[in-house]
Image: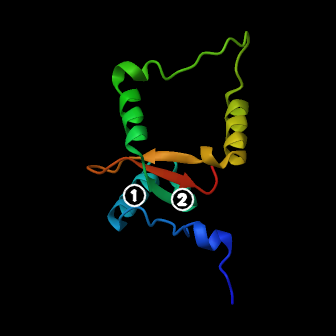
């Protein structure tokens, strides 16, 4: 008698794009293809709903008064190599898969989290 593996028995199978409607999925792809990151649309791994908590944090931090606080200053004492810094962050995102995400809010729909295969 074959017994299912522990993984098959207790872990749900992940069907990509199964947690959002086809309408939401299409709208997110339109957003991704229309913004500055055109090539990123091809690398979308999954689209997930956000939790109420995450949506609230995003809403609060995107108010005009809070957006002013969303910047960090670094005391480097010399000019910053922006391309080197960008490359360093890109490498970090590639190594830590949970950072390869973005947020999208298609017009008139809820906030969704977009997981990218690569950044």
Query: Closer to the camera, 4 or 66?
Result: 4
Q: Is residue 49 left or right of residue 96?
A: left
- Badge 1: how crowded within 10 Å, few (<14), some, or many (20+)? some
The answer to which quarter of the image holds residue 60 is top left
Percent x, y for residue 41? 51, 58
* In the displayed structure image, the side of residue 21 where residue 10 appears, left or right: right
Q: Secondary structure at mark 2?
A: strand
Q: Which residue is mark 2?
A: 44
Q: Residue 45, can we see it?
A: yes
Q: Quadrant of residue 89?
A: top right
Residue 30 bears which disc, if any? 1
Task: Decide if residue 36 is in sight here.
Answer: no
Residue 1 picture location, percent across and down: 69, 90
x 42%, y 62%: residue? 19
Q: Are marks 1 and 2 in contact (CB under 8 Å)?
A: no
Residue drawn where x is 43% and y is 59% of the image: 29
């Amino acid at each position: 008698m074959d017994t299912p593996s522990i993984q098959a028995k207790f872990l749900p199978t992940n069907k990509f794009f199964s947690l959002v409607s086809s309408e939401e999925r299409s709208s997110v792809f339109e957003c991704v293809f229309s913004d500055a990151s055109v090539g990123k649309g091809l690398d979308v791994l999954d689209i997930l709903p956000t939790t109420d908590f995450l949506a609230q944090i995003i809403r609060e931090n995107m108010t005009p008064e809070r957006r002013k606080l969303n910047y960090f200053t670094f005391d480097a004492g010399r000019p910053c190599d922006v391309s080197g810094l960008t490359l360093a962050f890109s490498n970090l995102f590639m190594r830590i898969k949970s950072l390869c995400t973005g947020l999208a809010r298609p017009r008139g729909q809820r906030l969704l989290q977009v997981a990218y295969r690569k950044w």
